[in-house]
Amino acid sequence: MDTMSPIERALRAVALTLVVVFFMFPIFWIFLMSFQTNETILSIPPSIVFSPTLSNYAALITGKLQTAAGTLDIAFMRNLGNSIFLSVTSVAVALVLGVPAAYAFARHKFKGSEDIAFTLLSFRFAPPLLVLLPLTQYFQWLGLSNTYFGLIWVYQLICLPLILWIVRGYFEDISADVEYAYRIAGHSWFATFRKIALPLAGPGIAAAGLLAFIFAWNNFVFALVLASADKQPVTVGALAFITSSGIQYGQIASAIVLSVTPTLALALYAQRYLVEGLSLGAVKG
Amino acid sequence: MYEKEKDLISAFLRGEVDRRGMLKGLGAAGIAAGSAGTLFNMMSTQALAADFDWKAHSGKSLKLLLNKHPYADAMIANLQAFKDLTGIEVTYDVFPEDVYFDKVTAALSSGSTEYDAFMTGAYMTWTYGPAGWIADLNEWIKDPAKTNPNYNWDDFLAGVKNSCAWNGQPGGALGSEDAKQWCIPWAFEQNNITYNREMFDKAGVELPKNLDDMIAVAAKLQKDIGGIYGIGVRGSRSWATIHPGFLSGYANFNQKDLNVSADGKLSAAMGTAESKAYHAKFVQMIQESGPKDWSTYTWYQVGADLGAGASAMIFDADCLGYFMNGGDNKMAGKLGYAAFAANPEATASTPNIWIWSLAMSNFSKDKDATWYFLQWASGPEHALFGATKMDFVDPVRQSIWKDEMFREKLNGKYPGYVEMFDASAAGASIKFTPQPLFFDVTTEWAATLQKMVAKQVPVDEGLDQLVESINRQLKEAGLG
Amino acid sequence: MASTATLRKPASGFRISRKMLPYVLSLPALLVCIGILIPFFTAVIYSFQRYRLSQPWARQFNWGENYLNFVTDPAFWNTLKVSLLYAGITVTLELLLGLGIALLLQRRSTINNFISIMLLLPLMIAPALAALMWKLMTNPSFGILSYLASLVGLHDFRWASSPDTALLTVILVDIWVYTPFIMILLLAGLRSLPTQPFEAAALDGVPRSFVFFRITLPMLTPYILTATLFRLLDSIQQFDIIYAMTQGGPGNTLTVFQVEAYLNFFQSTNVGRSAALLIILWAITYTLSNVFIKNWLRLRERARGEA
């Protein structure tokens, strides 16, 4: 790989540039829109020249939205808080439950292990709508509707299978010999799990946790159906800018920018783990 | 304090002085408009309280499910008046319109006791009513012990009020003798023309007088102005495409969605020669002068284009045109309004209407207290507050339309709006046949229109297929 | 944290706990999910009923009628066709593209790491909101993409509003949103591959294409399968993007399973038909994942055997 010809180097650079342009241009455009009023966004033809305004962000943060039909109260910051709380808690719960289970499936071939693993995965492919309808009724009876507890439980449908299956693959990649050696030295399985397996699977856990976080963050149908307005995440909250007196594109754009920020921060932070932990191949036989 | 002023307001509330006289008197007394409003609310609260025990449910609490909408905003702005009047505590959940009805369906279908009352459209009650999710409000409206004497049920526009009443029989006439009042109209939309006055002047065209004329005017506008399209109508794959301009014009030709036979069986009625001619013209109009990406057009795109000056006129809800004439829209202040009768032989416009209404959940734990809220929210005092101070258009009470301040507000900023309303209010009602398959029929109808506009299927053939498919579904559901 | 008691456990107790251990480890996860099975079975029952919320009096078991009706219903066959076509095209393209990008970013460097995180941005925007933004960007009057298209001569490109290009447009948005998902999984996989085989191949002067097809690709296959499986399951259940952009139109161009089922439930309140549609969708995904997981396990076994 070190013997790259200049032509190949150039081709790679061109390809990478195209990729970045394709994926980043809409983001860039949304970012620009977040500093524009609706009037400049809806100009014909679209223009890149505009005088930037912070009014969209001000509206989101203060919770006062000016529209053609007067001032509207919006709860965007509360929605953002809900999103953070729901996603963080759900992923944390899914990690606590999912990582040991993934380890069990990777390390121990036990009776029914594949069946249990498959059952857990199968929750991922039940269409959410299918379980959601009866679930509203059961939640009503159990008193779980409109509680964070109920929501976090349902969010496990998104997070748990993802974590379980990705982390399992990483555990299986770790040579059992290393753990064996440590065990023979007189350490408990728990110590082995904590000191050897977990750190080695770190990148896998980081990647799976990050993806689970993103999918939890992007979900909205669960909260919409199962909880009242004060527990809604940003995905529902941002739809409030589609008002009958017009779609507030500027505010939606800034809502997207604000809602992406925590996830991006998390990804940039987790990136360190991805890089550090990726010496995994060296451990392998 | 303010004794003289209080007397003046009391006189107004008793009907001895008209509104203008009262406001003049207050102005002379040096009361600023803001405090006059507060004073007025306080006094009307007292007047209401005089004849009726508004405190009967004091200390109770209610929860509402609301759509993010100017009507809801107007109510929330005035909500303290209700709390003061009744001593009832009110909380509410507001959901964005995009997902609002999904939330309502989810809450009601699970039998949730969380919400006591909610906003709805009349079409939706054709599902909610038979499903047993909402209460027949006649029980309260007709009970003088539960409804305050100033409520004045007869003040509601008859066509609008009746459109919210249905006997639950598939195909049963709206507002019949045995009809149940599933919801109370709050404010409604008539489908007529809103147009860009500058563009009309520039192209030198008159307001269209019928459908053929509309096709010609739209085409001329598109050609002469340049860079715009002639006419905005909705086109997404949804009931929302059928119910505004399209159905209003269709009904003007005396065409119906469904036939009801003597024994109560339903069958599709879009297969007539008149219907085919109407469809063909409407499709031609969209192809020639509609938005390029018409099939994705919802309320928002139709409005945004008009407001931004990308279209010359719309055949859609009057209050959509109303909203686009204000705010930060580029064309604010440049729009005009007119009634439209598609059929050259028709004497007047017969718009189909959308009615934002209030309904009572059957799972409410205290229906009498809920009714206190409903009668206040749909009562004359709040209607006047909403119409004059907020954007509560179109009001459903005749008395509001007679209110001079309201007419003046409209005439000043919304030229032609009052005339438009007066010309079509008499013919305004829901033109659909009430039945449980409403959304199946209209969604498929919209999909068929999309195919016709995209030239995937000729108009005649498309309608024949539609009729066949709807008849099959009606039979399957035991209605045909 | 590990208590001294566990460390000094007698051998016999150790063996018992070793046998039970995997169950103890996986049971909590299973329990959390098991509650969801009850609503699942309730939905299965619904699918065997004539059940419209707006006609509660007519509710009764009609056994297979909801399913039998599908056989003669052209709308259903269209739904099946569109769903499979959509899933097939998006997953194939995203896999190729995702693999390509992962290969471009394989070398560990600060810039590559940074790019790989930035490329995740489309995935971080909720698909429903992303679709709204795409709808604006493809609007013929205000849309930047329409404008750019007109600059290169595409004056009448109608994006999601024409039956000819609607599928193409939603696939484009799907690729934009979800390719990063495959990219990041494959990138993590590529970087975790053992280095020895590649070093050996480089020493022997083995051609690069041979290395790619005979070493990289086979070793990467488990990762590819995992990524494809998750993407396929999501893609065949696509809802957000299609619903936000076209509501299934124009005509019946994009009435995929979840859009149909959603409209059937929330608008028509035809619970029976909606549930039956979703059960069929579930059966399809179940079968697909079975095939995938069998292969995945087989490959894992083989890889371990070789190691």
Image: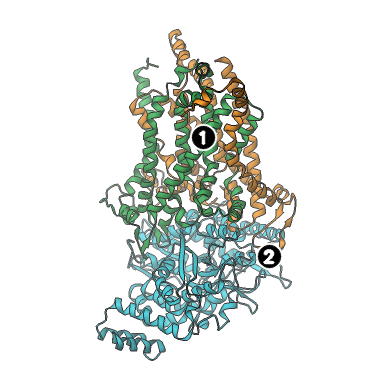
Chain colours: A green, B cyan, C orange
Task: Tell me where residue B68 sits by quadrant.
Answer: bottom left
**Secondary structure at numbered mark 2:** strand
Relative to B45, residue A45 above or below:
above
Per the image, the residue denoted by label 2 is: B267
In this rendering, the answer to whether A219 lies above or below B268 is: above
Q: Is residue B459 visible?
A: no
Residue A218 locus on image (x, y percent) = 46, 45
Q: Which disc number belongs to residue B83?
A: none
Q: Amino acid at mark 1?
A: Ile
**What residue did someone put label 1 on?**
A163
Q: Position of residue B411 (x, y in %)?
A: 35, 77
Where in the figure is residue B471, as x and y percent of width and height?
Answer: 69, 60
Residue C13 to residue C76: above or below: above
Q: CA distance from mark 1 to mark 2?
A: 53 Å
How crowded pointer 1 is (Cα within 10 Å; few <14, some 14-19, many 20+) is rated as many
Q: Closer to the camera, B230 or B447?
A: B447
Q: Is residue C18 visible?
A: yes
- Return the chain for callout 1: A
The residue at 67%/57% (across/down) is B469
Q: Are marks 1 and 2 on the same chain?
A: no
- To which quarter of the image does residue A15 belong? top left
